[in-house]
Each structure stands twice: as C-alpha cells, then as structure tokens.
Amino acid sequence: MIDAKSNEVLWVEKYRPQIVDDTILPSKTKESFRKFVSDGSVPNLLLTGGPGVGKTTIAKAMLEELGCDYIVKNGSLNVNIDTLRYDISTFASAVSLTGTGRKYVIFDEADYLNAANVQPALRNFIEEYSSNCGFIFTCNFKNRIIGPLRSRLSEVDFSIEQTERPQLAMQFFKRVISILNNENVDYDKAVVAKVIEKHFPDFRRVLTELQSYAASGKIDEGIFVNLKQESMDELFNLLKAKNFTEMRKWVATNSDQDMNEMFRRVYDMMQARVEFKTQPGFVVTLADYMYKSNFVADQEINMVAFLTEVMIESEYV
C-alpha cells in the first residue's frame, strides 16, 4: 500500500500507486504493462476505457518504474497548436537527463483534442520525435481519435470482464478501507461498499466522493440524503437573479450530494424554470459538464463552472 506524505492533497493523488503492481486492474491489462517495464521499452500507446479506471495512473507508474522523464497534458484544457509548437516540441526535442534517455508525453483525455488540427499535428510529431520521445494517449471514447493518429498507436483496452468485476471491487474495497483507517475517518463498511458499488469501476470518483463525505469526520447512511425540492427552487432563484456569490455558497453547501443526481435534478426542473428558447443551449451545456464530471479532480468547481455558464447564457421564468 502506498504511504501518504501529506494531509493536504486529494486522496486520488495522495494514494496514487507508484508502481504497476500496486494498481487495481484486470490481470491481462496489468500484465501488458508489466511486460513494458520488464522489456524496458514502451511503444506509443492509446489507453482506452471509462473514466477513473486507472489509465493515467498506470501510465505514470510504468514511466516512474522505468525512470523516464515525462510530462502530462490534459486534452480538455485547451491544448492547441501553440501548445504543441512550444511546450511539447521543446520537451520532446531536448535530450533526457535520466538514465533511460527516452522521454514521454502523456496526453490525458485525448478525445478532447481538436480533431481538425491538433490530432493531425500530433501524428506528425510522433514521427518527427520518434528517436527520443514516446507518446501515450488516454481516452474514454476512442472513436474520437482520428484514424491516422490511432494507426500509429498500440491500443490497450481497459474494459473489465464480468467475471473479474467482483475480485477487482473487493481489492478496491480493501484499499479504500486502508485509506480511511489511515485518515482516521469513522465509517460504516456497508456504506463504503454501497459507494463503491454505485460508481464501480470509477475508482477516482469513489475516492473523490469519500474524501468529500469524510470532511464531516464520518461516513454513514447520512451521505445518501437527497436534495430537497426547496433547495432546488432556491438554486434556480439564484440563477435567475444572477447571484454568483450565493450560487457558489449553495454548491458548497450541497457538495456532499451525488453530482450525477444534482445534474439530473437541474435537468428535470429546466422545463419549468428556463425560458423555452434557451432550453436547447441549457441542455447542451449540462451534457458537456456532466460528461466532464466523470473525470475532473474537483466536482464542486465543475458544478460551479456549469451553473455559471447557464446563469449567463440562459433566461429564466
């Protein structure tokens, strides 16, 4: 088990596995990465699978074991041609100071990379810097990666066979219990099991939610309390009044709620509280932020960003 070094960081980072063997993954998937480490050679990779299953975690762990220099770029954070030209090319072209001599760029959430210009440019980068730099892409939807780029990558599928799900869930349950004990959190094992069952195999989502619940010092059945209608009415009143400060406070107060449920409640109330002509844009924005909620590090910030956007762009009744 990985020891924590700080009490002031997110659990998903604090307890991130540092070696391949510490990851919780299907045996076939883990074996692929063990072989990369034992061979001392990593091809250009495309890691595909749902959010929070460990794609970026095992990529980092593998490169740490090999002693490689690497940087991580998030495809959803405006990675554009200028970023490629300056940040990536500078890193990729420089000689590594580590013993391995080979460097890597990890593109997290690569399915967000612009398919018209960024992805084609990366296809060329892979060839241009092949002598001393490798590329690893992670994505939730591989069909969003253009064919010419995918053809230059070896795919590793992170899907979980039905027969392996109980074993992996139990491994993660034991890992989570160890974390809660280390954090001195009072918990109900049955409730922890429910949270894991609810979000499996999104391990990141489980840890993020449990850390949020643990702020009160106890994880019990109280975490499953639903949002009341009065509270949702209050939220839409704040959106109509464009009261950003009080909206942020509302999100903070309700940050222990299930965010998927919150998105759904907002959607359900939209028809009655949002002007018809702005409802289509409202739905598109909601869907985008709901998708992002599957892998963002901070659910509260993501929800505030969503509500800020619909506060500005939508009209209310």
Image (cartoon, rainbow, N blue to C red):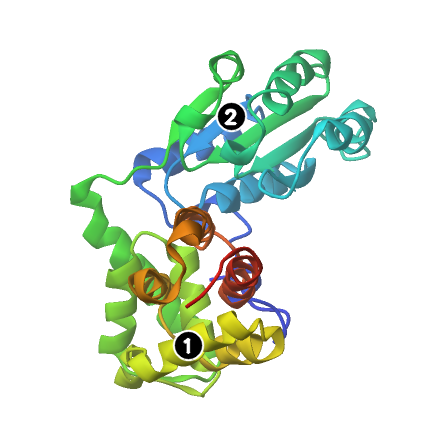
Give SS at disc 2.
Answer: strand
Task: Decide if residue 250 is in sight here.
Answer: yes
Residue at 69% x, 17% y is 125
Mark 1 closeness class: few <14, some 14–19, many ≥20 residues within 10 Å? many
Residue most extreme to the left = 163
**Which labelled disc corresponds to residue 45?**
2
Q: CA distance from mark 2 to mark 1?
A: 36 Å
Give me the residue at 66% from left, 11% from top.
Answer: 127
Q: Residues within 10 Å of mark 2 (few under 14, many from 20)?
A: some
Left or right: residue 262 compared with residue 102: left
Q: Quadrant of residue 107?
A: top right
- Residues at circles 2 and 1 in contact by the CB criterion of under 8 Å: no
Q: From the top left corner, tell me how far across and down residue 111 is, in percent.
A: 49, 33
Residue underneath mark 1: 256
Residue 37: in sight, yes or no? no
Give me the residue at 57% from left, 71% from top. 242
User: Closer to the camera: disc 2 or disc 1?
Assistant: 1
**In the image, 22: left or right of 248?**
left
Of residue 273 and residue 65, the one placed in the foreground of this image is 273
Mark 1 is on which residue type?
Answer: Asp
Query: Compared to 52, does 265 lie above or below?
Result: below
* Quadrant of the drawing holding the C terminus: bottom left
Say which amino acid is labelled 2. Leu
Q: Does residue 23 appear left or right of residue 187 in this picture?
A: right
Picture quadrant where residue 68 is located:
top right
Q: Position of residue 33 (x, y in %)?
A: 46, 33
